[in-house]
Image (cartoon, rainbow, N blue to C red):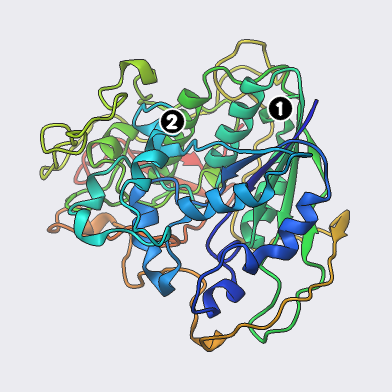
Amino acid sequence: MIYEIYSFDFDGCLANLLYLSSKKKDIIRANQGLLALIKTSSNPKIILVGSNRQGFLDDFTNAADNKRGSCFPAIKLICQELNTHEAPATLDEFLLSDIYNDLPDGASFKEALKYIEKNNKDYKVDKVKRPDLFPNWIHDESKLTVIYAQMHKMAKDHPHDDLQFNFIDDREDILNNLYEYFEKYPELIPHNVTLNLKRYMGPVDKNENPIDPLVMEYAPIKGTRPEADQDYRQTVKMMAAVTIEQMNAHDYYLCATKAKSPIKSYEEAKKYNYNISVIKAASYYKPGMMPINPPEFTTPKKSRFAIFGKSFFSSKNILTEVNSSYSSSNPSFSIPGSSTDSTPKPGFSYASSSSSSSNIDDDSDPVYVPKNSANLELTLDPIPEHPIEEIKDETHEPGHQFFNAEQHETDTVKVPRAIGLHRLFAPIEDETQEIILSEPNMETVISIPASSN
């Protein structure tokens, strides 16, 4: 059977300019052209959250910005609209905060809905005392970990079906980097999954002109991995751990609220409930790389968060706030796997190895000419309520910088989490970096290349 999976971004995509400019935030009306296009297919559909609002904190923080609201009830409405007798659509509530907190699939999504107002959009702010203590995730701006987890979950749930995985986002930089990454490493995609990257920004631009074509599609990428990653949850943690260590190795230090020193490992990030600067896994992780300090292997059944109750978010259950800094004598950089065989092995629990050494960076990306495009003439009545130019597309908190060598001994650095908080620059290929293996005041240093085979 053919399944169509749709992983939707929210900010700038479903929550587009038409949606934001209306007083009544109607997610269906703002996207009726896209939804009508999707409905033309009679294949069953599965809907996922493709936004980087993969945890309560990111969703709560951005819900109030321009009155966008929570993306969780919005994605439920989208799924209900797409669900028909001829082509049923089901919602998969899986979020990456489920992975990082060893929760059952959908647990974070369901818990967030308990704090939504009766208008089915906004949060009950007075009921949320400490949003930073809810189950969180390591915010991956590149969305590599999001797509990897979702593709392998779908392939694991549907091993014998043909899966058309449609990832829909408004940001061209994210889509270009993902296209280049998976085109280079198709072994990260299960063999029964075809990745379809699509750019969608809503029906109108900032000048209220119709966007033509409505959807721009990248060439499909067919997976080559023999089977789904049965331990994709652990692989995602490994990807994040490698990225954290690699960023430190290339002098891009991650900070956390109340941390007095950079975050150098996955375990340090976990101590701060993953409330750290954003990472870019697509820029620093290559298949086969393993972290020096790997995350502990856990399963949802062993998690103390596995069963929700009335006291789930009580002070006894929530992660204790850490005020002291954590230091490690181990060098914080990762190395590629030593194996030169790039053929994916059945049953191998982590991402397959590859012999390529290219990095994805933030330089100007080549313009990919879409293989085809979907165009639909819109007949929407204009419903502008607020001037378009006043609307921000993304939440930013300027002025926060990364740690540098001089900041190691400074006082607490408080960094609020929000989508797009930091824009990291990937390492320059072949540039030699000095990695200090001991304390900052020691003289022992070694030089390693920014990228290695």
State the image quarter where residue 361 is shown.
Answer: bottom right
Mark 1: amino acid:
Glu
Residue at point 59% right, 47% down?
Answer: 430
* Residue at left offset 44%, top offset 46%: 54
Residue 451 vs 171, above or below: the answer is: above
Residue 345: image location, x then y, percent: 67, 12
Q: Which mark is residue 360?
A: none
Quarter of the image where one finds residue 176: bottom right
Q: Is residue 298 visible?
A: no
Q: Position of residue 88 (x, y in %)?
A: 71, 38
Q: Give the position of the C terminus as an image quadrant.
A: top right
Q: Residue furthest front?
A: 85
Local packing at callout 2 (Cα closer than 10 Å; few below 14, some 14-19, many 20+) is many
Residue at the spot 29% in from the left edge and 31% down from the top edge: 267
Callout 1 environment at 10 Å: few (<14), some (14 to 19), or many (20+)? many
**Residue 53 located left or right of residue 345:** left
Front one among 429 and 26? 26
Q: Earlier in the sequence, mark 1 or mark 2?
A: 1
User: Which label is found at residue 187?
Assistant: 1
In the picture provided, is 136 more to the left or to the right than 16? left
Residue 186 spot, x, y in % from top left: 73, 32
240 vs 270, left or right, is right
Can I make out residue 41 in this image?
A: yes
Mark 1 falls on what kind of element? helix
Quadrant containing the N terminus is top right
Q: Residue furthest right?
A: 372
Q: How many marks?
A: 2
- Badge 2 is on which residue? 237
Q: Position of residue 281 (x, y in %)?
A: 51, 43
Q: Are marks 1 and 2 in contact (CB under 8 Å)?
A: no
> Which residue type does callout 2 highlight?
Lys
